[in-house]
Amino acid sequence: MIESEDRSDADAKVVVDGVGKVYNSERQRVRALAGVDFTVADGEFVCLVGPSGCGKTTLFRTIAGLEAPTDGEVRLAGAPVTGPGTDRGMIFQEYGLFPWRTVRGNVAFGLEEQGVPEPDRSQRVEEMLGLVGLGEFAGAYPKELSGGMKQRVGIARALAVDPEILLADEPFGSVDAQTREMLHAELLRIWSETGKTVLFVTHDVEEAVTLADRVVVMAANPGRVNEVVDVDLDRPRERTASGFAEAVERIRTLIGD
Ligand code: ADP
Ligand code: MG
């Protein structure tokens, strides 16, 4: 038993080890995270769920290397995170696209930063736009796109530099329900085609049960892991399939709503 736990930790792609975070400002001190421990295996799809304010974004930013933990550390393939890196691609709720760049220019951004030369760069951009079905919109600007299309650009941009880990913070929160379902199917297809490890933050329990192999259920004050739930349902998942509603109910009960 102990042996197998040791091995799974060594094999893990992401290890969140005793992570705590305190925000200190002049007026107040907020303990956003306390003693957060969990691991994500290579190629696994893990969702983080929990009520507003339980530290999901703080944890996402800590794994991304945008925020330093006050206690503990995050390790990626064994190495402690000390800042952002091209091993992690990020997708944000508000797209974070450059409005002055075309779709093609947005997807090319990380490749330019890396100094990837032509024609490799353009080839990679075309490949990514094909992957998300936006080949015909390569020359369009973000303001000409729907929310769902913008988020597909966000996915293509995150994947362009071929990160091993995809990190998303409530990425589909601003799109309508029908578009969100399409994006779920698309993300799952990309995940199975590329074998990426995905860490996906959401407050939507049904979204988590649709997507994840495992769901890390968090609690607030201070932000911590309440329980990690295995979602043992066949893919593709239908909300009406047997077991779906039970998994949703179980997680909702853990969250306390
Ligand atoms: P979630 O994404 O789950 O809603 P957050 O990580 O955004 O949670 O926030 C967790 C807690 O930390 C909240 O109490 C929030 O107000 C606080 N917090 C988040 N970011 C900051 C910050 N930059 N400075 C001070 N407090 C913060
Ligand atoms: Mg958040």
Image (tube, rainbow, N blue to C red):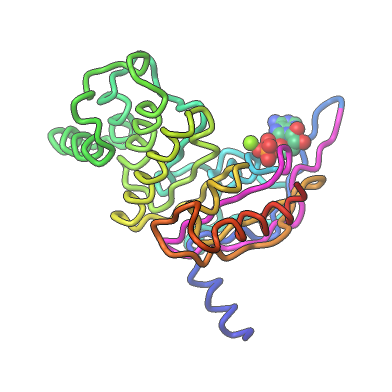
- Which residues, given as a range, are shown in magenta? 28-54
Q: Is residue 103 left or right of residue 232?
A: left
Within the image, what quadrant is residue 113 found in? Answer: top left
Q: Main secondary structure of the magenta part?
A: strand
Report the front residue among 191 and 109. Answer: 191
What residue is drawn where x is 48% and y is 71%?
A: 11
What residue is drawn where x is 48% and y is 59%?
A: 241
- Residue 205: percent from the left, percent from the top? 60, 48
Magenta run includes residue 248: no
Indicate whether 219 appears above or below 123.
Answer: below
Report the front residue among 160 and 43. Answer: 43
Indicate whether 8 appears above or below 144.
Answer: below
How many numbered markers are drawn? 0
Q: Is residue 208 left or right of residue 103?
A: right
Question: Which residue lies most toward the left here?
Answer: 119
Q: Is residue 184 left or right of residue 28?
A: left
Q: Is residue 17 left or right of residue 108?
A: right
- Residue 72: percent from the left, percent from the top? 69, 56
- Residue 256: percent from the left, percent from the top? 77, 50
- Residue 203: percent from the left, percent from the top? 62, 42
What residue is drawn where x is 73% and y is 38%?
A: 53
What residue is drawn where x is 63% and y is 39%?
A: 57
Indicate whether 103 appears above or below 51.
Answer: above
Magenta run includes residue 44: yes
Within the image, what quadrant is residue 153 found in? Answer: top left
Identify the image quadrant of the N terminus. Answer: bottom right
Q: Quadrant of ligand 1?
A: top right
Report the front residue among 58 and 212. Answer: 212
Report the front residue among 190 and 68. Answer: 190
Indicate whether 155 appears above or below 100.
Answer: below
